[in-house]
Each structure stands twice: as C-alpha cells, then as structure tokens.
Image: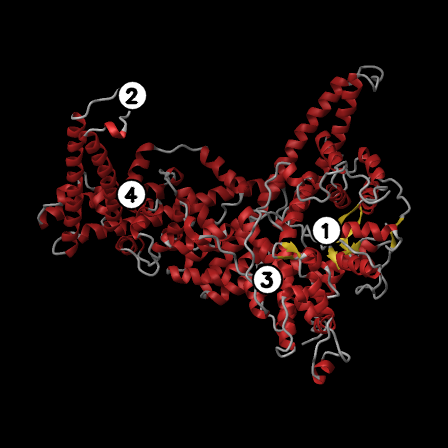
Amino acid sequence: MGAGTTREPGRPKHGPATSVARGKPAAPHGIAQLQTTAGNAAVTSLIQRQQVPQAEAALTPDQRKQLLAAATTLRRVPALSAADDALLGKAMGGAPLYDKIGERDRKRAQLAELNRQRMTLTPVAGVPDPQSDEGRRLARVITDIATAEGELRALDTEVREGLRPLGLTSEAQLVDLVTVQFPRRFLERGKQIILTELQQNRELAERERDRYAGGQPDQNALRAAARDLRTRRDELAGLEQQLQQARSGTEALPGGVREPAQMTSSDHDVQRIGRVIGERSADLSRQRDQYRVRFPILDQLPDPAVVADADDARLAQLTSGPAGQVIADIDTTKRNVESGRLKVWNLRDAVDMTVLDLGIGGNDVLMRSVREHIEQERGEETLVRIATSALALTAAIIATVASGGVALLAGGLALAAGATQAVQSYQTYAAEVAAGNIALDPRVADISLNEPDLFWLVVDIVFVVADAAQVLRIFSEMRLVAHALRDTGDLGEFARAARAALPAAAADKVIARAARYASSLPARGGGRAGIAESLEWLTVTNPLTGRPFSQARFAQEIEAVRRALLATEDIGRVHAELRRLGITIDRATVASIKRYNFDSAGIAMSYRNYVAWRRLASGQGQVRDAQYIVHEAAEVGHLRTNRSRTGFDHMGAGFENMSRGEQARWTADFDRAYMAAHRQALEAEYDFLAATVSRMTNGRVRMSRSLAAVADRARSEARDLMMIDGVVLKEHRDFARWEREAAATVELGTALRERLRLGPNPTISDLVGAVRTARQ
Amino acid sequence: MLTDDELRETLDDLASADARTRVIMLGVLARNPAGDPRLLPRLTELTTDETPVVLAIPYEIGEVRWAAARALAAERAVQDLPPHAPAELPSPLSADRLARLAQEAGLTTAAGLEGLQRAYADLRDRGLVPFQSSGS
C-alpha cells in the first residue's frame, strides 16, 4: 500500500481539526509572539508572560471581595492549629478516594441491576437463540456485567490501597473524616472568622462613636458630607419638578415618539432635563459610595440629612445612638456565635471566607461535604437579623469597594501610586492596613486577566503582605515558581522562592496554602507518550545495565531509564551548567522542563532530549544543549500562556484518570497547542544560536535567525516548521539566498578556528555546527 | 471491556479518514488497553495501514501500522492471548533524521509536516527507510 492509500481524497491528513469536529473549542489562533532577543535576554524574555491590551482588565466583584477579605479579616484570624492543619491535609488527600468509594458503590448498584436483568432475560429452561431479540439483549447484559465486574474490582483495589498512605485503616474512618470531622472543623473555623470580623466591626463602631464625640474635626467633615448629599438630593428633586412641568407642556403621543423636526421646545426640555437627571443621579450615587467608606456611620442613620445642621452636641447624640446599637448587636451576636445558637453559615459570606481561608475552593468533594452538613440545620431568622446589623459596617464598605464604586472615583488613576481619599479612608477605618487598594489596583486586575490561573497566588500573598506594591513585587518574583508548581505538583522550588521573597512566618503561611492548592489539582500520573527515536536508543548502551537495549524488553527498559532519570535530583546541576553556558534561567523553569520532557502525557521519551539533559546534568553541556533548553523554555512559556487563556493543561494532569475518548481528545488538543508553541520555540532557539555564534566569534560573524536555522545541518525542523514573514522558512523567497550564504566560506582567525576545531576555509554551516558542539 | 458507546467512539476513531486520529486512538489503546475482543479485528486490519503519519512528539514520522502493532500487542496481552511474532516494519524516523535521509537521497521535500510525511513515503518506496522490529 502506498502513501495515503487509506485516506479519503480531500480530507485533512493531520489531526488539528479533530477536536473541533468533536465539538471541543479550538485553541486561539494568533497568540502573541514571545518577545525574544539574543542570549540571556532571549531566555529571560521568552519565559515572561504575554500582555493583553489593558482596556478590559478588571477584577470581578468576587475577586475584589476575596482580596479584601484576605487583606483584612482573614489576616487577623489566628493560624490553624497543628492538629487542624493535619486534619485538613488528610481530608484534602482523602477527598479523591472518598469520591472513588461513591463511584464504587454506584457501580455495585449498577451491577446488581444488571444481574437482575440477566435473571429476567434468562429462560427457566434452555438457552435463547443468540439471533433473537432476547438472545441479543441477554448477550449484551452479560457483556455489561463483565465490564462492571472488572471496573468494580479495579475500584475496590484502588480504595483499599489508597487508605494506607493516608494513615487510615478502614473506609469508615475515611468517610468519618470527610463527612463528619472535616465539616465540623470547617464550621469551627468559620466561627473563628466571624468572631474576628465581629471584633473588627466593634473596633470600627467604637471609632465611629468616638469620632464625633465633640471637638473633633471629623464632625465638620461629616456635616459637610451630609449637607453635600442633601444639596444633591434637593437639586435632583428640583429637576424632577422641572421635568414634570416640561412634560405637562408637551402633547402626549400615544405609543410614539415625535420626529426631530416636529419637536416642540417642551419636548426638547423633557429630553434635556431627563439627561441632566441621569447625570446627577449617577454623581450622587458615586458620591454616596465615597462617603460610605469615609463615614460608615452615615449608612446607620435613618436620614443622613439630620446631621447636616446639627450642632456638636446634637451630632454626637445622633451618631452615638446608632453606633451604640451596632456595638450592642455585635456583643449579642458574639454571644450567639460562641454559644452555638447562631450558626455562622447562615451569615452572608461566612462560608465563602472560610473556603478562602482554608484554600479548599477547588476541592469539590470537601465543598459538597460542607454543603450537605449545612443543609441539615436551619438558621434562626431573628439572630441572623441582629448579626447582619452587627456586621453591617464592614459589609457596606466591602460591598462598595467590591462593586467598583470607589474605583470609579479614581478616574483611572493608578491607585497604588496615589490612592483616592475614599480608599485612604477605607484603609484607615476598615482595615487598619494599607492594603485596601489592592482590590482596586489595575495591575492586579491585569494579572486576573492575563494569568487567571495564578490569581490564587495574589490572594495568598495578600494574606501576609499589606502593601499593594509589595504584593505585586512578590507576585512577580514568584509567578514562575507558581507556574512550575502547577506543572510539576512539587512544592520544592515554590517553597525556596517563597522563603527568599518573604519573612519566615509569612513564607510558611504561603507555602501551606500553596500545598493545599497543589493538592486540589488533578492527580498527575505523568508518564510518556511512547518512545521517540527508537533507532537511536537501540544503537547505544542502556545506562542502567551497561549493555545494549534489549529489543524484546525495549519498552520496559526505556521506562526504567525514564524513572531513574526522574528519581535523580539534578535540577541544581543542570541549572549550574546552564549558567556556565551563559544561560540565565530560573530553577523552577528547569524543573518544569524536566517534567514536561520526561513525565508528561504528550511527550514521548526522546533520545535526543535525554542525551542533552544528561550532558547538562553531568557538567558536559554544549551549546546545542543550551539551545535545547532555550527551545524548551520558550515552548513551556508559550504553553503556560495558552493554559492561562484556554485552560488547556499541556502537562496532562489527570490524564490517567480520563476515559480513553477523553485521552484521545486531550492528545488531539495537545497536538495543536504543541505545534503553535513549537514554532515559537524554534524562533527562540535560533535567535539564541545566532547570538551565540556572534559572541563566540567576537562579533565577526553576525547572522539572522533564518540563516542560523538554514546553516544548522544537524537540525532540520526549523526549515520545515519555523515561520518567517508568515511563511515556512523553506518556502520563503529568500531561502535560496540563505542556503548560498550558509555554504559560503567565512574568514576566521587561526586561533578561533583552532578553538572551534575547524579546518581551513570553513563555511557558515561548518561554523554553526562547530559552535553547537562547543562547550563555550 | 468497553461499553457500547465507548466501543463506537473507539472504532470511529480507528476508522477515521485522518491518519493522526487513528494513531492517537492506537496510542491510547497501547497505553491503556481496553481488553475488549471486539477491537481485535479492526486493530488487525490496521496492521496493514501504511499511511505515513506523525507517530509521536517530538515529531517522529512513521506508518500507522507501527502504532497498530503496538496497540494490538497490548490488547492481546491483557486478553491473555498469545503474542503475535513481531513484524519487521519501516522504522519511525525523527524529523531531523528523515530530512537528512531525504537530502542524502537527493529528494526535494515540501515544507511542513505534510512534506515530511510525503518524504517518508518516498524514502520508504525507494527502500531507504531502515526496518525495525515492531516489538522494539
């Protein structure tokens, strides 16, 4: 059979469209190109994130609330006790296994039903004709029973073997952990959080009460605010009156609007006044938001206008009443919470804040367990009403900031640099820390837009760091290790970076939260997508046995080599060797590359990758090995960007738990994501090689990435896949010229030729080949 | 054993007009055999499919039957069936090795993966692709 004989004419030959055909979303085209330059700059820039135009960047109200909660109440809540921390870790680890128990029990029920069907279909005597409807149905049920029995056995084994690593001896213990102990501790933690929030409100209420007690400049400010609101309301009322009058002067048109040419002056008045009312209403609303955070007491007054003209004594009296009532409600609510009469989950945001505090948002099993526990008990309406009043001060402020009301006042200013008065007030009265503006900072919004999968890291940093500028600096220092954590599931590099960026206690807290985040990610079986370059493997000695690879046990032997490589702690050595080769790249990215190349679902175990890695790990790295790392770093960077935008995980976490159909779809999607990333990586790789040739010839030989790619005789992929000016290199109009240039001789000094082991009259291709195998 | 829906989906992929779709499903079965005898006829049929295709990433070109031989071997193993003797098949080639062989043979190749697959077929038809045991 010749090439393509089983393919239908005109049908696509390769797989990029397969997922689309299956109804899966296609990866976005035209992904911005990584900015690369030469040498170190190439490596550092190509792993930087890509920027998206800023115009649409905005945090959602929910994200703002998360940041505010982390920056205020949750920061004040005492740390989890060691016992609670251990219980939480165990519950998170046990959650997937608990899910399996449910799956197994459902499978048991399905099997019982199938056995019942078999009994019904099996005749009392004899065997049904296999060709009859009955016979076919029976055969199908028997097949389904065999399938279900096999699956049940596998689930049983999985559950049994999963208990020991958790330190549990029975399923009952696991069920108790997930459905009883965990929700109980969750709600205890919720109680602690609410008590902290109540205390925070009490301090705020006391300050509000004392603030206007007499002789305070705040009295004048409050009166001015109340007068301003009254003036604005009066103006609006006047406008409403004018509108009524203008309307009365117009002739009603039943069901229609007058043509512009036929409009009377009254019609114009109605339009104009209506417009002004709209503008003034919006102004009033914005101004009210601003005052709400500057003077929380205003919201507690039946009518804010009553303080506008009140003298000092009257004003103190008017404000102390509501503040005193709030304090009384707070004290009552504290008692109700402590006694257990008030169930905290009946309070708005209590569950959300506890989820955020414990970092279990991504754990569906534990969330379900908490919900089920909560649904068993009902709240007491009266107590909830008192508690709502007790928490009203911070609730109003948070709602205002979260909705963006205050941000609107900023008029697009960078709040971290010069916060508005409203935000300053918020900081002073609500949080007592200079952190409120984090929720309003456009750079934080930018992160949420460009790297939504790293928003958890922003929140975690906000838990321990108050200042917006610092939060952003630390985020920038840790974003690559956070990506690596997602890639590898290993905390090592993340912990190292956290300790370098934060004080010890804060680092511990961030690391503990990151560990919970990592445990909520899909389980990664790792693995490999087959073996690549088997011919090459078969010509070398198996490093584990010292003998040639056996053809009969080839796959097993390669797998053993792969596992041995993964078990070797060589990230530090590779990192150091890359530095010797002039490449600056962070350790976390090196760790990600290792995992991506040798332990991810889409990449085959490649001889070339393995040999390059081993040379680097053994301190024998050559320029071509640095070229390999530059390529992989660019590829990983591009795939991470793609993951942030589309959610597609190029590492294939959870691949082993997917159905076969899902595995096939994942692989088809990986094909497409890989091609886009690989093309970009080829550009980075040849930028690096061109720059290295220039550096090693002291600037005497300079070349473009295109020429470097054409002159590289050992690697052809760039010619076939790298795009230049929108076309594949090989089909570029200048390709023939680059080939001539690659074949042309180049003048090099004797010393340089000797250093590079080049003979007389080398060509550009000879030079590129010699540089690639040089050790620098 | 596959459910009826899974079987249909698997067979659909194995019968796809797109060779890469066939190979992806063959790869899934080689890695995670279904233990379903209903797949064996189609897998056996695909062991004669000589369509050049991307077999692996990093890019490696070979024939569909290379992947089919592995999937069939895995399926037979989990079904406790005696293994077939490995066949000598044209070896998969990395993109770089393929390009080098094409250059040595004086072949002008088109760009892209399409070009590489066509080059593979040309080299194979000229007997220039080395053979390798499908068991390795």
Q: Residue at x 48, y 58 (%)?
A: A510
* Mark 4 burial class by Cα count in 10 Å: few <14, some 14-19, many 20+: many
**Chain holding disc 1:** B
- In the image, residue A660 sits, relative to residue A358, either above or below, namely above
Mark number for residue A589?
Answer: 3
Dot 1 and dot 4 within a common chain: no
Do the numbered discs 1 and 4 sit on residues whose CB atoms are within 8 Å? Answer: no
Q: Is residue A21 visible?
A: yes
**How far separated are the C-alphas under marks 4 and 3?**
46 Å
* Distance from Cα at disc 1 to Cα at disc 3: 29 Å
Label 1 sits on what residue type?
Answer: Leu
Q: Nearer the viewer, residue A80 or A243?
A: A243
**Discs 2 and 3 carry the same chain letter:** yes
Closer-to-camera residue (B74/A596)? A596
| In-image side of A399 versus A500 (left or right) | left
Q: Which residue is mark 1?
A: B113
Name the residue that disc number 4 marks.
Answer: A392
Q: Position of residue A16 (x, y in %)?
A: 67, 44
> Mark 2 or mark 3, which is nearer to you?
2
Residue position marked by numbered label 2 in the rendering: A255
Give the answer, above or below, for where A254 lies relative to B2: above
Three-letter amino acid code at the position of disc 2: Gly
State whether discs 4 and 3 lie on one chain: yes
**Residue A78 visible at all:** no
